Image (cartoon, helix red, strand yellow):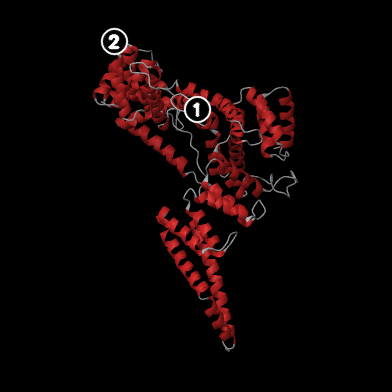
Amino acid sequence: MNERLAMECFAKAAARGDVVAHEELGFAYASGWDGTPRDAARSVLHYYFAANGGSVTASMALGYRHKHGFDVPESCETAVMYFHEAAKLVVDEAAKRTPGMLPFQIEKHRLSAEMAGSNIAARRERDLVQYYRYSADMGNVDAQVTMGRLYSLGARGLPKDIDVARKYLEDAANAGDANAMAHLGHMYANGFGVRADNATALRWFSDSASKGNAMGRYGLGYMTLAGHGIEQNHATAVAYLNQAAEQGLADARFFLGVLSLRGIGTKQDLTKAYNHFNIASLAGHEVATYNLAMMQLNGMGFPSSCASASTLLKQLAERGTWVTPMEHAYAAYMRRDYRGALLRYMKMAEMGLEVAQANAAFLLEHKLGDGGRFREDTQVNPLASSTATRALHYHRLAATQGNVRSLLRIGDAYYYGRGAPVSLVKSVAAYRQASEQRNAHAMFNLAHMHEHGIGMQKDLHLAKRYYDMILTSSPEATMIVKIALHKLAIHRWIINHHDELLAFARELKENPTAQMVDFVILVGATSLLLFVMGLRVMLE
């Protein structure tokens, strides 16, 4: 692949206003992927033109930058503006989905060295779908409902086929399954894949609700509220919706939020509306999440909070179909196409996806897929930063979004000088930040550094405190920590008896076996050092 020629073509296309070309150039200047010198200003400029041309990827990249102040002025309001574009598209798509059916989330796997080259998960999923199809065709009601849901959403490798979905659901409903009855009710009520028919919808909803099904009760609630095929009655509708919400149905909880917000069938109460939206949002309801963000942004029911609103909108934007490259990247990694995996993860990292940032750092740390693009000795770009430096860059991005493992890797990078000059002060700062989140590895590292006075004043008391904290927060590390505490006790004893030991050593020098004693001491010291290093590796 001639990447330099590709860059020239992208530059010509961008000059003519091509959105995709601007998007690719924004990524190239941000990452230095193909040997292009990194240029933050040019990257932001190209992303700006791409976003104005309707690129969701570019909008998310700019929203992420403005939220954290990376290469642009930090501005929560500007971040909200960019995230809102993507979030609104997710909400619009969610409105087309059958009520009661939350979407299958796009998988965002965290990489590990043991995963590469294994297609067990993919094969297992295919086998599972085949098993459900076989069971459904043999008359298994639960399998029929599952297949109906899969086909209605077009998920797990199956094409979206409403006719097939309806057939499976009708088979299950005729066999007495309440969930299938409710799904069919929603299809007929909203005209999803069938001709809208209120009478048929009410029949299915009533049959489902009579069995105590939450979706059936929800269906009766919104049909009664709107007066579709039944006499309108707000009080009865609210009662049905409350029953469904108490059973954990996110759609019902969202609907109650809307009623409380507008004062329909109940007294207007912004606080209740906020609480309903919040509960539905935690269950994954996209429209509830959007409404919650708008209430936070405009200070409805609670004080205005742009930071909280931008976080919600970012989370919502990350549910769009434009993040499916996360699944493609994982598939590439599993088949050992590390270059393809790294490229996709780096592009997703520019959009602010924390998992993509951590995975890009992982691949670069293990020198997988970069093809010499970031090494100082590369012929592609002699001025490019080292692979370790780029890995550290992505760890910093992930750590900013709360990734504790990345905080640990940052601490290790400054401790050992990987991708950055050795700085024990920065190493300690990273470990402390991770330890504040009760991370056992970080606390162990701080205990070790306190015990031996590495990067800070020697303090055995603080070392013991950190070891004790590990026992409280991570019981699975009890054995390792107990051994470390015994070592610490021996260390304390040696310090407390320093003078006596020194005097004893002087007497040994006058003894013919002094050389043997020196050898034993050397071996013991070496063993102690290796033991401590082994403990750290085990905690990882």
Residue beneath the point at 29% across and 24% down: 173
Residue 73, given in percent of the width and then of the height, sits at 65, 33
Which disc is residue 204 wearing? none
Q: Is residue 311 left or right of residue 391?
A: left
Q: Is residue 512 left or right of residue 131?
A: right
| Corner quadrant of residue 525 | bottom right
Residue beneath the point at 58% across and 39% down: 345
Residue beneath the point at 44% across and 56% down: 469
Q: Is residue 503 above or below residue 79?
A: below
Which disc is residue 304 wearing? 1
Residue toward you, 515 or 442: 442
Q: CA distance from mark 2 to mark 1?
A: 40 Å
Which disc is residue 231 wearing? 2
Q: Is residue 90 above or below residue 67?
A: above
Residue toward you, 304 or 38: 304
The crowding category of the residue bearing disc 1, from other C-alpha atoms within 10 Å (few below 14, some 14 to 19, many at least 20), is: some
| Corner quadrant of residue 477 | bottom left
